[in-house]
Image: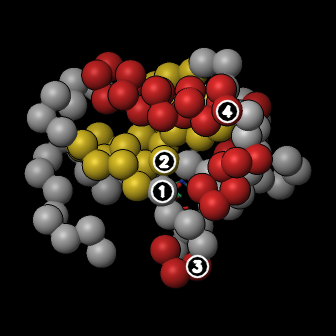
Amino acid sequence: MENCLFCKIIAGDIPSAKVYEDEFCYAFRDINPQAPTHILVVPKTHVPDIAHISGLPADAQTALLAAIGKIAAQEGLENGFRVVSNCGPDACQSVPHLHFHILGGRAMADKMA
Ligand code: AMP
C-alpha cells in the first residue's frame, strides 16, 4: 500500500533489522525497543489492524501466529514473552499496518494497561 511505512519496510525501500521472513510474514526489530527483545511481526499483505485480520487468507493468519512462536524460540525467549497488537486510537496504534509486538528478555509488568 502506498505511503505505508511497514509496506515500505517489507519491500526493502526502508531498511530494517530483519529477524524472520516467510511467504506471508516479515519480522524485524522495533526501532524504539521497549524491552531487551522487541520484534514486530507483520503480514506481507496490508491490512490496517487486527480488527481487519479476516481480510487476510486463513493460511496467512495461521502463518502470523506460527511465526510468533518460531521467532520466540529463535530469540531464546524460553522464560516467556508478551505479544501485543495495538488497534486504533484508544490503544495508541501509531502505524496502521497490522503488527504484533513480541516483547521479552525481562519480566513484564503484571498489569497490561
Ligand atoms: P504501534 O504504536 O503499536 O503502532 O507500534 C508501531 C511500532 O513501530 C512502534 O513500536 C515503533 O517504535 C515502531 N517503528 C516505527 N518506525 C519503525 C521503523 N522504521 N523500524 C522499526 N520499527 C519502527
Give me the C-alpha separation between circle 3 and circle 2. Answer: 16 Å
Nearest-to-viewer mark from 4 and 1 = 4
* Vertical relation: 22 (above or below) 112: above
What residue is shown with label 2?
A: 100
Q: Is residue 107 left or right of residue 13?
A: left
What residue is shown with label 1?
A: 85
Query: Of the residues under marks 4 and 1, which one precedes in the sequence?
Result: 4
What's under tag 2, amino acid-wise?
Phe
Residue 58, label in figure: 4
Give me the C-alpha separation between circle 1 and circle 3. Answer: 12 Å
Query: Of the residues under marks 1 and 2, which one precedes in the sequence?
Result: 1
Does mark 1's beta carbon lie closer than 8 Å to ligand 1? yes
Give me the C-alpha separation between circle 4 and circle 1. Answer: 18 Å
Q: Secondary structure at mark 3?
A: helix
Determine which quarter of the picture holds residue 23. Answer: top right
Q: Is residue 57 left or right of residue 70?
A: right
10 Å neighbourhood of mark 3: few (<14), some, or many (≥20)?
A: few
Q: Observer-nearest residue: 95 or 23?
A: 23
Q: Secondary structure at mark 2?
A: strand
10 Å neighbourhood of mark 2: few (<14), some, or many (≥20)?
A: many
Contact, mark 1 vs mark 2 (Cβ under 8 Å): yes
What residue is shown with label 3?
A: 89
10 Å neighbourhood of mark 1: few (<14), some, or many (≥20)?
A: some
Give me the C-alpha separation between circle 4 and circle 2. Answer: 17 Å
